[in-house]
Image (cartoon, rainbow, N blue to C red):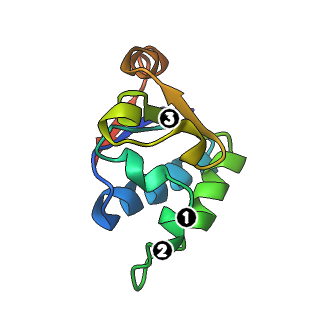
Amino acid sequence: MAKVAITVNGSEPGNVFPPFILGSSAAATGDEVILFFTPGGAPSMVKGVIEQMKVKGLPDLVELYNGLRSLGGKIMVCELALEAKGIKEEEFREGVEIVGATTFINAIKDATITFSF
């Protein structure tokens, strides 16, 4: 089993779809998956946002999100996004963990696969 760490640096579909597609695929094969949303990517984890992201030919993001979580994937959002982006903790999707960068770094120290989008 591998540990997969994926950093999400933007909230546009091109930043959001790949992490969930790769993350879900890795989790489905039994890998441990951690997605970390920097302040730039954090707005995509606000309730209702991924429901509006539709790209022809790509899977439904809500299904990918729910699938990743049901397979044990962790979704972390950098706490700096709260002030930097003016987002309140309760505005984030269910299952999102608000953490500091140190928590993310400690969680991925033994990651064998890393991506950044």
Q: Nearer the viewer, residue 103 or 107?
A: 103
Q: What x and y, as percent, mark residue 89?
A: 55, 37
Question: Which mark lies nearer to you, 3 or 1?
Answer: 1
**What's the residue type where badge 3 is placed?**
Met
At a point 52% along the width and 48% down the height, the residue shown is 26
Image marks 1 and 2: residues in contact by CB distance under 8 Å: yes
Question: Which mark lies nearer to you, 3 or 2?
Answer: 2
At a point 42% along the width and 20% down the height, the residue shown is 100
Q: CA distance from mark 3 to mark 2?
A: 21 Å
At a point 42% along the width and 25% down the height, the residue shown is 111
Q: Secondary structure at mark 3?
A: strand
Q: Is residue 105 above or below residue 25?
A: above
**What's the residue type where badge 2 is placed?**
Gln
Q: Nearer the viewer, residue 76 or 26?
A: 76
Q: Is residue 97 above or below residue 11?
A: above
Q: To which residue does mark 2 refer?
A: 52
Location of residue 95 (image quadrant) = top right
Q: Which numbered tag is attached to residue 91?
A: none
Q: Nearer the viewer, residue 13 or 78?
A: 78
Q: Which numbered tag is attached to residue 76?
A: 3
In the image, taking residue 21 as reference, residue 67 lies left or right, namely: right
The numbered mark, 3 or 1, whose residue comes first in the sequence reads 1
Q: What x and y, as percent, mark residue 112?
A: 40, 28
Q: Secondary structure at mark 1?
A: loop
Q: What x and y, as percent, mark residue 49?
A: 48, 63
> Quick check: can you spot residue 31?
no
